[in-house]
Every structure is written in structure tokens, then in C-alpha cells.
Amino acid sequence: MRLFPAKDESDKTVVQPDIFVVCDTDKLTENSCDGAPDFIAEILSPSTGRKDRLLKMNLYLEAGVREYWIISPEYSIVETYVLQDGHYIAAGNYTTGDHALISIFPGFSIDLSTLFPPEEEEAEAT
């Protein structure tokens, strides 16, 4: 994904989010997305956490990504941020059993029990 596409494709800011939604199909090319998607979610791992929280979050803000989620499988937490007046505003923190609202799509939410099973189910699985 090229957040700040140059016509001659000389741009150096290329990222590969874990999950993204693009509502403007004119941004899609055969091999890429040229410009900011509307929604991005990054799934944290020990090796990517710092990069996702600092570098990528600032790039997504600068590019104008309307909603950004940080998903922590280790802690079963989803942090949501919404672009407002040129800044990300914390929109919510969610965990197992919650329905995380996607604010850019009114009325749409994700049941986080599908991502993070309740502790009883985890104990039964082991």
C-alpha cells in the first residue's frame, strides 16, 4: 500500500497493514492501494508492537486514515482511534465479549468473542 503515491511511483512510504478497508475503489490498482484506506487494523506481536503504535500510527494519521485499530492478541484488547480535526481520538477499548464499534460504518460492530474466546473456552481447550 502506498500511502502517499507519486505519479512516477518514486514514493518511499509503502506499508503492509494486517487488515484494511478501502471504500474508494479508484484507489485500488492491480497490485496495490494508492492512497489512504478508510480503515486499518494492525495486530500486535512482540516484534511489531512499537512500530505499529508509533511509526505506522503516525503515518496513518498523516495519510488521513479515518479509523485505526490496534489489536493485542496477547492481552485480548482492541484499541480504536478515529481521525478528528487532524488528530486521532481514542474512540474505545474493547475486550472479550464486547462488540467493538466501527465508527466510520454506523451501526456496524464486531463481536470480539470471535477474536478472543472467553477464558472458560480457553481453559476447556487445553
Image: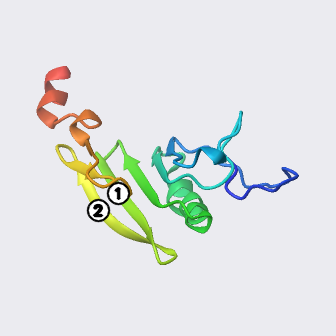
Residue 102 falls left or right of residue 96: right
The image quarter in which residue 67 lies: bottom left
Q: Point out which mark residue 92 bears.
A: 2
Q: Position of residue 35 (x, y in %)?
A: 66, 54
Q: Is residue 73 above or below residue 124?
A: below
Q: Earlier in the sequence, mark 2 or mark 1?
A: 1
Residue drawn at point x = 23 percent, y = 41 percent: 111
Q: Position of residue 99 (x, y in %)?
A: 21, 47
Q: Point out which mark residue 79 bears.
A: 1
Crowd band around label 2 with a 10 angstrom C-alpha radius: few (<14), some (14–19), many (20+) = some
Q: Position of residue 84 (x, y in %)?
A: 44, 73
Residue type pointed to by label 1? Glu
Residue drawn at point x = 65 percent, y = 48 percent: 27
Q: Is residue 28 above or below residue 81?
A: above
Q: Residue furthest left?
A: 120
Q: Residue furthest top?
A: 125
> Tag 1's secondary structure?
strand
Residue 95 falls left or right of residue 61: left
Residue drawn at point x = 49 percent, y = 45 percent: 21
Specify the quadrant that holds the C terminus: top left
Q: Are marks 2 and 1 in contact (CB under 8 Å)?
A: yes
Residue type pointed to by label 2? Gly
Residue drawn at point x = 51 percent, y = 48 percent: 23
In the depicted view, which residue is nearer to us: 70 or 100?
100
> Tag 2's secondary structure?
strand
Crowd band around label 1 with a 10 angstrom C-alpha radius: few (<14), some (14–19), many (20+) = some
Separation of disc 2 and disc 1 at Cα? 6 Å
